[in-house]
Amino acid sequence: MTRRDALIRVIEALHREIAALKSNDVAALERATTEKLSAIEEVAALGTGPAGTELRELADEANRLNETCRIYVNLMAANVRRKLQTLTGDSGAGYRPMMRAYA
């Protein structure tokens, strides 16, 4: 396997990860994440070296897709936080640590 092949596997797994996030399919998300991590390990195992234009473009695409995944996860977390605040009657502006008085 070449670094190019491994990067393409990362990109394909990231596409599956995004699709799973969009559909809230936890099992598919777990599979895609496992595949992505495996492909990333393959890229790392193949070592470093001069990267031509094609490898840089593939790496940039993987980075963009990973950023998209991160944004989806952050949006999901914000939605869960908002729903929990609604359920608990806490419509506060976010995280507030509990202050305790110590004697």
Image: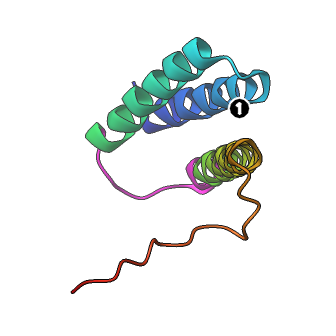
Q: Residue furthest bottom?
A: 103
Answer whether residue 57 is magenta in the image. yes
The residue located at (58%, 50%) in the rendering is 59
- The spot of residue 28 in percent (x, y) is 60, 14
- The spot of residue 10 in percent (x, y) is 54, 33
Give the magenta part as a residue range.
46-58
Q: In what element is the residue under mark 1?
A: helix
User: In the visual, does 46 lie left or right of 87?
Assistant: left
Work out whether 97 lies above or below 53: below
Q: Quadrant of residue 21?
A: top right
The amino acid type of the residue labelled 1 equals: Ile
The residue located at (44%, 37%) in the rendering is 3
- The spot of residue 88 in percent (x, y) is 68, 46
The residue located at (78%, 29%) in the rendering is 22
Category of crowding for the residue at label 1, using alpha-carbon neighbours closer than 10 angstroms: few (below 14), some (14–19), many (at least 20): many
Q: For the N terminus, which image quadrant? A: top left
Q: Which is nearer the eye, 57 or 74?
A: 74
Q: Which is nearer the eye, 24 or 84?
A: 84
Q: Which residue is mark 1?
A: 18
Q: Residue furthest front?
A: 103
User: In the visual, does 28 lie left or right of 90?
Assistant: left
